[in-house]
Amino acid sequence: MRTLMKYEFRKTWAFKVLLLGAAVVAEIVFLIGLYGGLDRVLGVSVLLLTMLAICGVMAIGLGSVVQLYRDMNTKQSYMLFMTPNSSYKILGAKVLENGISILLAGAFFFALGALDITLLFAHEGQLEELWNAIRQFLSQIDSRITLDFSTMLTFVLSILASWISTVTCAYLGVVISTALLNGKRGNGIISFLIIMALLWLSGFIELRATESIENVRTVFVAQSCIALVLSAVMYVLTARIMETKLSV
Amino acid sequence: MLESKSITKKFGSKIAVNNVSMRLEPGHIYAMLGPNGSGKTTWMKMGAGLIKPTDGQMLFNGQPVGIESRKSIAYMSTEPYFYAWMKVKDVGRYYADFFQDFSYDAYASLLKRMDLAEDLKTSALSSGMMAKLKIAVTLSRDAKVFMLDEPFNGIDLLTRDEIRACILENAQPDKLMLLSSHLVEEMEAIADRAVFLKNGSLADEADLENLRETRGLSMADRYREIYGQEGA
């Protein structure tokens, strides 16, 4: 499994290095804007960092779906399926490598964001006062809403876990399209509809399972756990189809 | 050793392999012959476990082909299949990582013999160089079964001689070699048995010496008999 994961990482490392490089550049621009008193530069860098965080994490997931499609529909598929590894291992390496990448990228941007906010507050005292006022205002509207560090952390975790589950849904759609509907008319549309239905179902399950929970932090933790369990179910289902039906 | 039992593969309404039963034994070099679309590649891919049969079974040592058989079966596709980011040395490392029977020393030696530099990018290789690389990496395994799909495709005469020599050196009593090719005369110099596929079905399976002794026919003669104008 580790060897498979090594090669999965090797296939995607160029994009990850590019993302990291872009984040470093944006961070330098942020620091120049902050300490050089250049408000416009600061604003642009904050926007850039936010976009990089959101789009970067999304692109890591989407990239792995495209890679899975390539690994099953081009001659490169022999590189994987000729080796003495089961589909469970092959797909497991993809899910793990991508899941870890998404979590690490999320953690990196979360830590960078926390650092930048701290620097910003230290440099611009009135911003912290504004932040505290927003927090107080929100808690007066609904006492369950708290903007502390641990709530933010669980929120980010639930977003990342939910994205991982979305990616595994897409894996299942790609495998159904390739292994079960290959060559059949409208297989792309059918696969897309299956992915949408799966996403709706997982969203419905998350909603129903967490609607009675009062504490916001607990809701985020529960959502994360449900998303990860759904990812595991999608993985087993996808690997089972690959193992029994896939021809490359 | 490698056996197909009433194996059939359909792609939609097209039947690529139709109810083929045959048993290939170690210690022989088999030539798998037939015109385009006769089912050679599909049969080999089912042997390598890359394609699932629609019906019937593919067995290796009595067990269905799968993860275990892939440890002992070396398959070389006719199309290039390496990742574009790979250099020639990465291909060897990849095989070393996944196949216990792979020898990097044997690989390095074959590369030298084939005049291929380890630092070349696979995406920059000509078709001839790619063919040599595929042969080198496949024959560097100490596998029990070698299935080489069109090993002489796009290769010049001298390299063909080199590849033929490599194949013959790898042929041992406990190994089975199966080669497909359109170059019937080329195969005649290597193979001792032949399998003829026609429209996805098994047309004949012959011991070439026996064919010569009993009917006075060469492999090419038998090919002409089976395929006539269609295979010419």
Image (cartoon, coloured by chain):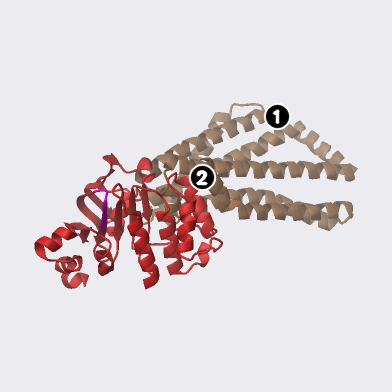
Chain colours: A brown, B red
Give residue B196's mark.
none
Horizontal relation, residue B137 to residue A53: left or right: left
Label whose residue precedes the other's in the sequence (1 or 2): 2
In this view, the residue farthest toward the left is B214
* Closer to the eye: label 1 or 2: 2
Chain letter for the residue marked with disc 1 in the picture:
A
Crowding around mark 2 (Cα neighbors within 10 Å: few <14, some 14 to 19, many 20+) is many
Chain letter for the residue marked with disc 2 in the picture:
A
Q: Nearer the viewer, residue B6 or B176?
A: B176
**Does label 2 lie on the same chain as label 1?**
yes
Residue underneath mark 1: A144
Q: Residue at x 27, y 66 (%)?
A: B36
Q: Nearer the viewer, residue A136 or A65?
A: A65
Give residue A4's mark.
2
Horizontal relation, residue A194 to residue B206: left or right: right
Q: Residue at x 24, y 64 (%)?
A: B34
The answer to whether residue B91 shows anywhere in this view is: yes
Q: Is residue A79 covered in magenta?
A: no
Location of residue A88 by image quarter: top left
Q: Amino acid at mark 2?
A: Leu
Q: Could you tell me residue A137's position as x and y percent?
A: 79, 35
Q: Nearer the viewer, residue B213 or B123?
A: B213
Horizontal relation, residue B105 to residue A217: left or right: left
Q: Which residues are magenta?
A: B25-30
Query: How many marks overall?
Result: 2
Q: Could you tell me residue A24's position as x and y percent?
A: 75, 52
Q: Considering the numbered disc 2 on the image, is that residue within a helix, a strand or a loop?
A: helix
Q: Could you tell me residue A183's position as x and y percent?
A: 35, 56
Q: Nearer the viewer, residue A177 or A139?
A: A177
Q: Considering the numbered disc 1 on the image, is that residue within a helix, a strand or a loop?
A: loop
Q: Could you tell me residue A152's position as x and y percent?
A: 71, 36
Q: Is residue B28 covered in magenta?
A: yes
